[in-house]
Image (cartoon, coloured by chain):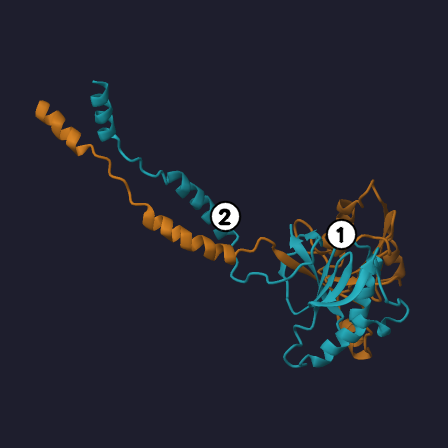
């Protein structure tokens, strides 16, 4: 029995794992990853300004059988005016898209605007372009938020081509 | 007796091993964090000091071709200073005649130097703009860019 206890004691010596090579590897990896890490993930929103259209380009749009519509978001200091433009839809049909959303506190009711745009997209699925007309005093941050709402909803894409314009 | 005890104690003293387990834990956390933020194409874009970019849901990568930086106190094309900005007004910029502005001339030079075959797809401007600026300031830059032959542009935003 005593011999067994003595033998057990002699086998109980701690075997430490040599961590030094792992530490060395970490010390090499961390500076490498630090140099290639991107802490700011910069993305982009593609936009354009209206350009003069030639008659050839206009013919292309007229040959398209399915009607398209261009929603317009007019951002004013205290409200957002929404309406639609199209040369393929009757004026009476366009008139029903005229709507106005008053500013609620410091922000615009973007959720309501998104619902409005979703309805429009459902009716005219071929439409891709939206016109955003901000007032001079509208902040850039608000314009970007509105553009986000106009381009995507939570479910699907709405109007991916955003055009910044002056008042028509 | 006491001296003998002290001698005995000194002999039994074992140098303590350095505990690197906690350091290993720390390194592992740092390593995982860095692995998640690893980018094979790190951004080499210079953002003006004090500039706050707006946040957006956009998932499109930023094309780093021609950059226009519009902060609350300066307007730059690439690294070149074009004009000072004071309270949202670009100094020396006539809204009625954007063709006479330094920005227009500079962009026009860049436009002429572009190879039409090679740079057809990359001829859009990336605009870095402070989120606190009003549209009237941005509009001057956007309108001038369009007139100089860059109707397509990208607004640089931070990922939400």
**Residue drawn at the location 46% of the way across and 57% of the way down:** A32
On screen, residue B21 above or below A146: above
For mark 1, what is the residue? Answer: A141
The answer to whether residue B49 is visible is yes
**Horizontal side of residue B106 vs A100, given as left or right:** left
Query: Where is residue A7 drawn, in percent x and y?
Result: 12, 30
**Residue drawn at the location 46% of the way across and 44% of the way down:** B29
Query: Where is residue A136 drawn, in percent x and y?
Result: 86, 56
On screen, residue B68 above or below A113: below
Query: Where is residue A140 drawn, in percent x and y?
Result: 78, 54
Q: Chain of mark 2?
A: B
- For label 1, the crowd category at 10 Å Cα-Cα, with few meaning under 14, some 14 to 19 and many 20 or more, is many
Mark 1, secondary structure of its residue: helix
| Chain ID, cyan in image | B
For mark 2, what is the residue? Answer: B33
**Horizontal side of residue A55 vs B9, given as left or right:** right
Quadrant, the C terminus of chain A: bottom right
The tint chain A carries is orange
């Amino acid at each position: 029995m005593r011999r067994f206890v003595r033998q057990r004691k002699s086998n109980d010596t701690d075997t430490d794992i040599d961590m030094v090579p792992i530490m060395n590897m970490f010390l090499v990896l961390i500076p490498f990853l630090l140099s290639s890490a991107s802490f700011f993930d910069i993305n982009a929103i593609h936009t354009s300004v209206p350009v003069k259209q030639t008659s050839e380009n206009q013919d292309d749009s007229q040959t398209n059988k399915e009607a398209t519509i261009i929603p317009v978001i007019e951002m004013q200091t205290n409200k957002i005016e929404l309406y639609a433009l199209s040369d393929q839809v009757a004026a009476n049909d366009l008139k029903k898209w005229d709507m106005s959303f008053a500013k609620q506190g410091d922000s615009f009711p973007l959720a309501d605007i998104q619902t409005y745009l979703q309805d429009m997209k459902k009716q005219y699925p071929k439409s891709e372009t939206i016109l955003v007309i901000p007032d001079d005093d509208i902040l850039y941050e608000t314009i970007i938020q509105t553009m986000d709402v106009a381009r995507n909803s939570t479910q699907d894409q709405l109007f991916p081509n955003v055009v910044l314009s002056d008042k028509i | 007796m006491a001296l003998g005890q002290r001698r005995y104690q000194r002999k039994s003293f074992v140098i303590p091993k350095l505990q690197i387990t906690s350091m290993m834990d720390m390194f592992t956390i740092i390593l995982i964090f860095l692995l998640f933020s690893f980018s094979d194409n790190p951004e080499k874009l210079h953002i003006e000091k004090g500039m706050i970019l707006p946040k957006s849901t956009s998932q499109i990568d930023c094309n780093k071709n021609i950059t226009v930086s519009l902060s609350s106190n300066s307007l730059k094309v690439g690294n070149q200073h074009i004009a000072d900005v004071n309270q949202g007004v670009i100094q020396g910029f006539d809204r009625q005649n954007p063709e006479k502005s330094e920005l227009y001339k500079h962009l026009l030079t860049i436009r002429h130097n572009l190879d039409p075959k090679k740079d057809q797809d990359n001829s859009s401007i990336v605009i870095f703009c402070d989120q606190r600026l009003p549209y009237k300031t941005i509009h001057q830059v956007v309108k001038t860019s369009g007139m100089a032959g860059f109707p397509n542009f990208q607004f640089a935003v931070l990922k939400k």
